[in-house]
Amino acid sequence: MREPVDPAQAVVLQAKSLLAMHGIDVSGRCVVVGCSGGPDSAVLLHVIQRLGAIPVVAHVNYGLRGEQSDADERLVSSLAERYGVLIDIERLAADAWVQSGRTGLQERAREIRYRFLADSASRHDSAFVAVGHTLDDQSETAMLHLIRGTGIDGVGGMPVVRQLAPGSNSSPVALLRPLLTTTRHQVECAAMHLGLEWNHDQSNDDPAYFRGRLRTIVRPAVVSAFGEEAWLNVGRTSNTVGTYSRPAHRDEVNAKMTAAAGASEQSLRIDKLCAENPVWRSRLLLEGLKRWCPGIPRSRKTVQAVEALLDAQVGRRVSHPQGVIHKERGELHFASSVESASASVAERELRPGSAMRFGGYVVHCHELAKLPDRVAEPDCNIAFVDDSCITDSLVIRNWRPGDRILPIGGEGSKLISDVLTDGKLATRARATQPVVTHGSEIVWCPRFALDRRYAATDKSSRVLMLVCTTGITFGRDKDR
């Protein structure tokens, strides 16, 4: 007579086999386990410990559901106590979410969650973070991708192992999904067998969210018409595609991305993109979004908008709250929300003897008795200003549309925007470009032009030497 199957041990063995298939052994290693208070993460903690790892529980209290959020935190804390493991908790105030719409809220919560998990891994010197996604979650993800429109990566759904953005110490962290071939029913049976308590987050079933509609409308319809296995087969197919197709496809994507890399970081050459067939061109644009603008939805609409930049004028862009893609000379440049955020810096007074940090630049101001007898090769990072022309404070600020300068050697005035264009300053770098002003007049546009009205001469009795230094590149495009 066969011995009754221990449902918890069955899940452990299934997870061990899945991780082994991907060359992962967590025995003796510290693993940060993301726990929400649901059955999936509770069983995951049990699995990770039974695999011989040293778990650390990590929980985010989003503060979105009042007492229910606090109840989840208490439940996770008691779970960590039961298993005798350390716990990290991140608490967020409910008013931090006021400006988020429903979709934006979910995206923001996910961003916070994974950043916290990576930081927790850094604090505990762990190379692994584990989350409790199941086969049912994989079916939902694959269906979401198919409904929205996707390629082979989307059909492959969530990978069992992927690189997580580095935490605070920049060490690489692998995100593991050990339960991705285990059904939600198996997980709940294991939880009941172990006597684990869990909470049900009703917001997961909220039809206001796309995934909530899948769970409450689409899945029941599929199960009613074709049976439970039909729904799970969506996830199994996704796992198969991801396991066998993703690695080979990834190698080819990486090779093509390397060949198409632009001269500047986070950019792709337009000529290389145009030389690809439409399928691969779209795939490379998707990869650029994934690598450099991860917050931008990788949808067909987004790709079409970015692809339209290939035939657009230099300076055109596709903007999104989570990033921006610029059309430069011969390149498309991708910048995340952090990089593309407004570079506006408050105006600051520039005094003799001071060094003023402004964005990525440092502007120094030195008093000289006279113009140096010999000035080396012209250097637009240095300007010699006649101090007798300065009757008010010098101020450093961002340049603004409409700003004009009277450049040395020119006739009449010139817009700063034209100065930057002629100087081939990359569009993405213009937002950080400073100018030094005197009242309403531009004295100096560092690296590009000095106003001839303020230029020091041999007859100048007092001279101000302005020097602009930076620890970053100015972003000027190379001649092609």
Image (cartoon, rainbow, N blue to C red):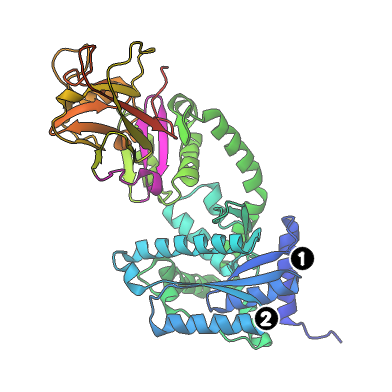
Task: Evaluate if marks 1 and 2 touch, with contact meaning CB atoms under 8 Å apart.
Answer: no
Label whose residue precedes the other's in the sequence (1 or 2): 1
Quadrant of res 128: bottom right
Residue 364, how many percent across, how many down?
Answer: 34, 32
Position of residue 374 relative to residue 269, above or below, is: above
Quadrant of res 9: bottom right
Instruction: Identify the residue at image location x=56%, y=53%.
Output: 166
Instruction: Identify the residue at image location x=62%, y=86%.
Output: 196
Dot 2 alpha-carbon crowd within 10 angstroms: few under 14, some 14 to 19, many 20 or more: few
Q: Is residue 238 left or right of residue 145?
A: right
Amino acid type shown at disc 1: Ser
Amino acid type shown at disc 2: Gly
According to the picture, the residue beneath numbered tag 1 turns out to be 27
According to the picture, the residue beneath numbered tag 2 turns out to be 84
Q: Is 34 or 362 nearer to us in this picture?
A: 362
Residue 443, how many percent across, how many down?
Answer: 20, 26
Magenta residues, start to end: 322-346
Residue 458, how many percent across, how many down?
Answer: 24, 11
Quadrant of res 177: bottom right
Estimate the spatial distance between the alpha carbons at disc 1 and disc 2, rounded to whole Å: 17 Å
Q: Check if residue 337 falls in the magenta segment.
A: yes
Residue 76, how many percent across, how many down?
Answer: 55, 80
Q: Check if residue 11 falls in the magenta segment.
A: no
**Can the viewer see residue 189?**
no
The N terminus appears in which quarter of the rendering?
A: bottom right
